[in-house]
Amino acid sequence: MIKRILNPTDDQSYFLFGPRGTGKTTWVRMHYPQAVYIDLLDASMRDRLSANPQHLVNFIPNENKNWVIIDEIQLVPALLNEVHRLIFAKKQKFILTGSSARVLRRKGINLLGGRALTRMFHTLTAVELGSRFELLRSLQYGHLPLAYLGKSPKAYLKSFVLNYLKNEVKQEGLTRNIGGFSRFMEIASFSQGGGPELYRNRP
């Protein structure tokens, strides 16, 4: 397990935003093992809380002193009103992870009025990789953990792009021409993924 630069906090609720695949869920579960964990990628959990956001309190034990982690909060943004209430009324501390702060801001969702910090979780850095850092691998595959450290980076990145096009771009309606955007990403990748070969051939 690579140690990330981000440090846990003990005093205030916060949003933890970052791209899919950077390791947000792994990080929060490792650093807050006693937390109440609510996974909104679980369809049944998501449906229950989408229908009745006020039922969030039912998943939190009475007199709970531990953190409450809500993973992928942008999937049920209506929960933020209830989170706001529980922070104010019960002094409950939350960690709210998400891959898209843009979705929440664009919809004018309650971002807790300063009652929660905003922290960012990025891809692996050269400092975090330490002796594992390789310039050519970095240029070719980037720093998503499963791409950089995995045995099949090309297959992982292909799957990642397909999921990105489906979940981030198409569902949010950021472009009407998803095929054209997909081709643009492929062309753009040539300047990134082709880097190692270009550098090898330089005098």
Image (cartoon, rainbow, N blue to C red):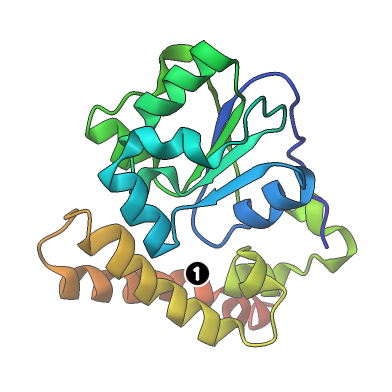
In the rendered image, which quarter is residue 131 located in? bottom right
53 sits left or right of 63 in the view: left
Q: Could you tell me which quadrant the N terminus lies in?
A: bottom right
96 sits left or right of 108 in the view: right
Q: Does the rendering let one see residue 123? A: no
Q: How many marks?
A: 1
Q: Does the rendering let one see residue 198? A: yes
Q: Residue 104: x percent and y percent? A: 32, 36
Q: Residue 170: x percent and y percent? A: 21, 63
Q: Residue furthest left?
A: 176
| Residue at the spot of label 1 | 192
The front one of 4 and 110 is 110
The front one of 59 and 159 is 59
In the rendered image, which quarter is residue 196 located in? bottom right
What residue lies at 77% left-to-right and 69% top-to-bottom?
A: 134
The front one of 166 and 9 is 9
What residue lies at 37% left-to-right and 66% top-to-bottom?
A: 164
In the rendered image, which quarter is residue 203 located in? bottom right
* Rendered view: 105 above or below 129: above
* Rendered view: 78 above or below 13: below
Q: Residue furthest right?
A: 131
Q: Secondary structure at mark 1?
A: helix
What residue lies at 76% left-to-right and 55% top-to-bottom?
A: 126
193 sits left or right of 64 in the view: left
Q: Residue 108: x percent and y percent? A: 24, 27
Kind of residue sitting beneath label 1: Gln
Q: How many other residues sit within 10 Å of disc 1, few (<14), some (14-19) or many (≥20)? A: some
* Rendered view: 182 above or below 70: below
The front one of 94 and 135 is 94
What residue lies at 62% left-to-right and 25% top-to-bottom?
A: 93
